[in-house]
Amino acid sequence: MKKVILVIALFFSVLHVNFAQKKTELKKPNIILIMVDDMGFSDIGSYGGEIQTPNLDRLAAEGIRFREFYNNSICAPTRASLVTGQYQHRAGVGYFDVNLGLPAYQGFLNKESLTLAEVLKLNGYSTLMSGKWHLGKDSLAWPNQRGFEQFYGFIPGASNYFDIGEYGKAAPVTLIKNNKKENLKPGEYLTNKITDNALSFLDEQNKTNKPFFLYLPFNAPHWPLQALPEDIAKYKGRYDIGWDSLRQERLSRQRELGILLPNQQVSQRDPEVPLWDNLNYDQKQLWKAKMEVYAAMVDRVDQSIGRVLTKLKELKKDDNTLIIFISDNGAQGGYSGTNRRQQRNTGPIGSPGSYDYQEQSWAYVSNTPLRQYKNNMHEGGISSPFIAWFPKQIKGGAIVKGTAHLIDIAPTLYDVAGAKYPATYNGVTAHTLAGKSLIPILNGNAQEVNRGEPLFWERAGNRAVRKDNWKLVSTYPGYKWELFDLGTDRGETTDLSGKYPELVNQLSIEYFKWAERTGVVDYDKIKPSQPMQIPGQSALPNPTTVQRNN
């Protein structure tokens, strides 16, 4: 009898422990990491834009915004740092998703750089992804092979938003769902499909007792400019005022919001952007149509985020979910002015068959108040909006300096999840994390990251260092350093390198030390014989006919 009682007591003891463990797991917060593609610093409402983004504006009002959050200036290197917490070279994606023959430039994630999905899965999370991968084309490097239990989306850097096979000018849009190929059906729109699959994954995951991590990288508003007619209609006439007036509107709004501080210098007018009033009628019709479609694409992303918020509430998980929103780089410059390269379209801008993109004149507005564009290390290339929302955990409406980087996301999420970062994974010694947790800022205990060392960038010969308020930057093929005081000159209008040569030397020495330990190689020694095009029209199958559309 004593033995029976002991066995029964032991059984209920184990049951109690298991129940307690399940209860602890349920208390772990859910995490949603949202990224948009090629969207500028000022495009959404809470950062000064006129595009209708009520759901993101709500997250900003109820959460926290950073004035300074940094990416790696271009798609694949940004994603490498985001999903691993490593500088891009350390993760193996120093240039792009192409192999340049060195470990730091192999074009896919190495095994030493653990992904968010791998680490969080080890710590009891369901790991879900829907959207753009762009971190390795070989199937061994796809999301399901790097820790994601559920994946829907596409692998390379760009995709059509509509299936246009019916036109006979391009192949159907091929997508991947858990390692199996499927095609976008006629009439479907990719942003909606990415959202549909994310919601389906959440419904299925809800049957478990685990917390979830959802990575939701939309490809919008990356080219080609293709949007739903009902979204485009919302912006008809809005951009008739042109980019000069619109930029002034955004600057005023940023000052009102507190995104742009009163003492800050804004970037000087881009001399390559023509005055709107100097364009003729036909040119204005063409240009305003581009921005109407671009705005519609951002609008649809915001609608999709609204659908995710509705799903969270339906599942009763909205109070225990952290959401972070960022962009992978600044808006894309490129061909500008009125002597533009003709686009290879088979339909009007915005329709299936449109291969247009935003271009420099509007990108100049999107990156307000910052200088330069995607693929450049000035602030317009490497700056992103940053919104974090976590009900009952983050004080609503706060705007802080931040000065955070992609490498800080991984330690933040592991901190929030109470996740242990392993020293080894599948027999491989893991790289230590490069960044710092943002929890002190999110909790209101700090205004910016206290990392104790500078931030560094290198991509295709473009280089930068950020230490305190000082920014050192050089643009390939030149090697001359510029120095800016971002404390008062976020627009990078005044080069102080001649005034403070010792500081330039000090920061450049720190840069070269970082470059050596991170695997950075002089770009002239490794650059491809045919450098990647910006924008990369070759990434998508293009029609052969040329048509100008108003």
Image: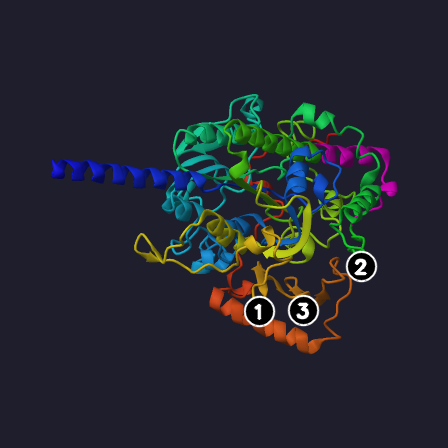
**Which residue is label 3 attached to?**
481
Mark 3, secondary structure of its residue: loop
Amino acid at circle 2: Asn
Which mark's residue is nearer the viewer, 3 or 1?
Answer: 1
How many labels sit on residues? 3
Q: What amino acid does circle 3 point to? A: Trp
* Image position of 332 (left or right of 249): left
Label 1 amino acid?
A: Tyr
Residue 434 is inside the magenta segment: no
Q: CA distance from mark 3 to mark 1?
A: 11 Å
Q: Quadrant of residue 220?
A: top right
Q: Could you tell me which quadrant the N terminus lies in?
A: top left
Give the residue at mark 2.
263
x and y percent of residue 386 in the render?
Answer: 63, 47
Magenta segment: 273-293
Mark closer to the chain start, 3 or 1? 3
Query: Which badge, 3 or 2, is on the more N-terminal residue?
Result: 2
Which quadrant, please, contains the C terminus?
top right
Look at the numbered disc 1 and give the secondary structure of its residue.
helix
The residue at which mark 1 appears reads as 511
Q: Nearer the viewer, mark 3 or mark 2?
A: 2
Q: Vertically, is 173 above or below 492?
A: above
- The x, y position of residue 132, in whole percent, is 52, 39
